[in-house]
Image: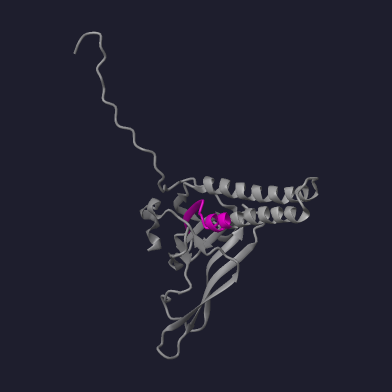
Amino acid sequence: MRCGLRPHLATPPRLARGFTTTQRVFAPTNAVTAKVLGDTRVLATYEGPLSATFRRLKLFSLGSLALASVLTPVLLLAPGEISMAGRVGLCITALATSGVSTALIAWIGTPYVGTMRLLATPQHQHVMELNTLDWRLRKQTTLVYEPAFLRPTSRPFAAWELTNSAPAPRDVPATETTTKVAETIDDKTGTSKGTWAVTYAPAADDGGASAKVVVKGKPTRYFNVHEELLGQDWQVLG
């Protein structure tokens, strides 16, 4: 080592930034979940890396639809050489194009899960909290009380769905029983938008149980989640 020169220390390579699932000790509290479930323990959390992108895309589509609606009367009443039939045709084309694009973006982006948490209730029950946005950008929370009902889906732009094929119950019920599988709640009003339930009844022929899925209202059925970002804490999904 030559005098007057500082030794060169090898710096460790910088790791590429990635999105991972972390177990947070102080996870954000959801008022809807706290009201429905009470005290819960957070087992795992998830954040969708494209949630901000989908939000901006929906905002842009709604803004373009509103702008087209506002400019339609102006185009009809403005002086010009275009005939009234031509103006009506242009207005219908603009509104139809904007409406179709807004509906398409809503269909693609509504299932996207911005945040998700795996919770444990005092009764040692695993509950999933999935937060999404509806087509009007209103926040809604879906609580899945039976994660076994979440299955892979063939719907484009979605990874999971609440299945219509109910799994067999752990114990054959003696009488007809109804279990709430999932519920979607509007975050702003706190009202339920819909529930997904299953009714089990004893089968007389083979001693087993028959199952019937009952859907009330409009609960969120499809969810778009990046499964590659889920850690081992989410193995409760099977």
* Relative to 133, 73 lies left or right: right
Q: Residue 116, how many percent across, how many down? A: 49, 53
Please tell me whether residue 88 belongs to the stretch shown in magenta: no
The single residue placed furthest to the bottom in the displayed view is 205
Comparing 78 with 66, the one in front is 78
Is the residue 112 above or below the residue 203 in the image?
above
Image quadrant of residue 237?
A: bottom left
Comparing 94 with 154, the one in front is 94
* Relative to 163, 220 lies left or right: right
Please tell me whether residue 112 belongs to the stretch shown in magenta: yes
* Relative to 20, 101 lies left or right: right
Comparing 35 with 8, the one in front is 8
Q: Residue 92, how many percent across, how many down? A: 69, 56
| Residue 85 visible at all | yes
User: Which residue is rendered at x = 54% and y = 49% of the image?
Assistant: 54
Residue interval drawn in magenta: 104-121
Q: Residue 52, how many percent across, how many down? A: 53, 45
User: Which residue is rendered at x = 60% and y = 71% of the image?
Assistant: 216
Assign the N terminus to one quadrant of the image.
Answer: top left
| Residue 33 visible at all | no
Q: Residue 162, how many percent across, how many down? A: 49, 67
User: Which residue is rendered at x = 50% and y = 51% of the image?
Assistant: 115
